[in-house]
Image (cartoon, grey):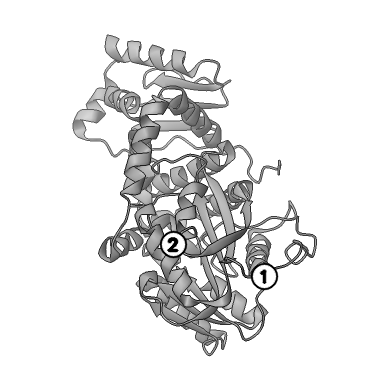
Amino acid sequence: MNKSRLEPLGVPNSSYDFGSDFEQQARRKEPGPAARWLIRQLRSRLGESKVAVCLWDEPVDKDAIASVQFNDAGALWQTLMNPGLNFGDLYSAGRITLNGDLLAALDAGYQYVANNQPKNRLLAGAKASAKAIAPDLSESKRNIHHHYDLGNDFYKLWLDTDWMQYTCAYYPEAEMTIEQAQAAKMHHVARKLRLKPGERVVEAGGGWGGLSLFLAKHYGVKIRSFNISKEQINYSREWAKRESLDKLVEFVEDDFRNISGTYDAFVSVGMLEHVGPGNFDQMGHLMSRVLTAEGRGLIHSIGRDRPGRLNDWIDKRIFPGAHPPTLREMMDLFESSGFSVLDVENIRLHYAETLKDWLSRYEENVEAVRELFDEAFVRAWRFYLAGSITAFERGTLQLFQVVFTRSGMNQIPASRKHIYVDGDS
């Protein structure tokens, strides 16, 4: 996939100021020798990058594809000390101004961090810390509330208008709209699971209910969907009633750990990132307990090629407690629970395209976002969406779909023809 769904994203200079009086005074002062030395060091580390960096008293390089302007000496120092954590906050607060192409600026930032961190030590620490990530029910509720209960009106501004999907779409045709691509994703999932009318399906982490309602409407299955976000559950139940699908779909306000009953299929799209590797073994045993002898399952999750913690700023401001797993970490779901992995697909570039569509709609509705929240929030979510595009394009993040069934279950397709129909590829 090589198309771009966004023109270079220009970020205008902001007239908003979130600094203290001290910081405002500092910006009016001429930078000292230390700030001059630090900016020279940063320029040298960026090498041949087409992104320019400058201090607040310096002109912006109009020939650069993008520029990063530090509005006080503290912002420059904090960025150099911990760019992964501090840059997002400084940009959100207006202490850093981005001009030109935001995606190009963030790509340069990713390259800077990659070139200036001790990889071996960080990798060893990431492996050790990942094993400890096992949020309990109360922690999971706090984390979900932080992100998903911002309000349905906010998400409606920039997600697809048909099914409210806040997960990776699927673009078998390059010029699909986000609505078409999200429907294609759900058909892709359903075909992988080989769903048949009347079958019983359980969903772990249902979002606003779009996937369950889609599967019930188009494939005639009966679904129980578990979710701990009160905002989303209320929305889902009302939606099911409006569509007269409430006899086929039951939305349960509860944690996936409390799933009961037996089912022909288990599906989880965009939820595993919040489970934590420390809980994977428990989740695997649960899936084994609730699936029938010929049951199938699909896990759709953001992931990584190598173990690592989520970006510090994303963890602090956007997705607290989240952990995108590697495939090796995901195997803890299956290896001790009697499952065979049938199919693994990585659709990370589809997530980059999804995020470009989301960011485009976000910018179209940015004034409405500003009315709901404030300018710092507007900048933070712009930074999050744009940074996520860069992460998927660079391969820092992956998107795995894993299909599984019980070991020795032989009622499986002889080929992938059932998946790739209607032009999907």
SS state under label 2: helix
Instruction: Locate residue 408, reporting x and y percent.
Output: 61, 67
Q: Counting residues from the N terminus, which is met first, the one under dot 1 or under dot 2?
A: 2
Callout in the foreground (1, 2): 1
Q: State the quadrant of the C terminus.
A: bottom right
What is the crowding at mark 1: few (fewer than 14 residues within 10 Å), some, or many (at least 20)? few
Q: State the quadrant of the N terminus.
A: top right
**Residue for point 48% across, 19% down:** 46
The count of marks equals 2
Q: Which mark is residue 410?
A: 1
Q: Which residue is mark 2?
A: 154
**Residue for point 71% across, 41% down:** 2
Residue 94 in view in this figure: no
Q: 63 or 350: nearer the eye?
A: 350
Instruction: Locate residue 251, reporting x and y percent.
Output: 45, 80
How far is disc 1 from disc 2 in space, using C-alphas? 46 Å
SS state under label 1: loop
Residue 23 in view in this figure: yes
What is the crowding at mark 2: few (fewer than 14 residues within 10 Å), some, or many (at least 20)? some
Instruction: Locate residue 318, reporting x and y percent.
Output: 37, 50
Residue 308's quadrant in the figure?
top left
**Residue for point 76% across, 62% down:** 415
